[in-house]
Image: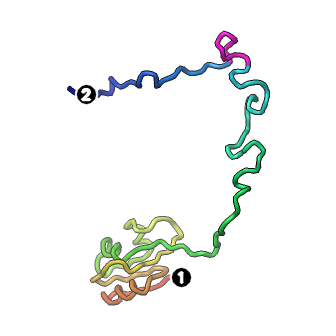
Amino acid sequence: MDKVIKLDDLKPFPGSRHREKRVGRGHGSGHGKTSCRGHKGQKARKSPDIKPWFEGGQTPIYRKLPKVGFTNPFKVYYEVVNIKDLVRKFQANEVVDLESLKARGLVKGKNVKVKVLGDGEIDFPLTVKVHAISKSAREKIEKAGGKVELES
């Protein structure tokens, strides 16, 4: 018969809990005098300010490894929206712009640029005002009777 576990029955496994080491409480405790820190040295002091990346004076790994790549400060990043997302969230003859995309949860953040891609099919007209659009997405929207306006 399986025992039912209840919250008031829970307790740690035997041997998994240890008593706290009480240091600096006299010689008789076994942890007196230097409080388990040894004699002198950087780590024996009250506030050893040793950074996690410090490697004891040897050349640290971040200085041994070569620098690779760079970040282009002029790259333009776009939030991507597919046609199938527009079909799911918009009705016929609606205007799709940054505010309406944010309101429907398709785009997050401020000062974002939006690009529409052509994944999916559309069969009703929409007026799309975005920063960029793929060739296939433009063709599908215009074929369905919609308009595309690019914002700068």
- What amino acid is labelled 1 in the image? Ser
Compare residues 116 and 59 and report the one nearer the observer. 59
Q: Residue at x 39, y 83 (%)?
A: 137
Q: Residue at x 30, y 81 (%)?
A: 122
Compare residues 4 and 85 and report the one nearer the observer. 4
- What amino acid is labelled 2 in the image? Val
Query: Where does the image place residue 40, in percent across and percent down from the top left?
Result: 79, 27
Quadrant that contains the N terminus = top left
**Comes first in the chain, label 1 or label 2:** 2
- Per the rendering, the mark at residue 152 is 1
Query: Where does the image place residue 67, in percent across and percent down from the top left?
Result: 69, 63
Query: Where does the image place residue 34, in percent across and percent down from the top left?
Result: 73, 20
- Residue stretch in magenta: 24-33
Q: Residue at x 66, y 69 (%)?
A: 70
Display coloring? rainbow
Query: Where does the image place residue 135, in percent across and percent down from the top left?
Result: 43, 87
Horizontally, residue 108 falls left or right of residue 72, namely left
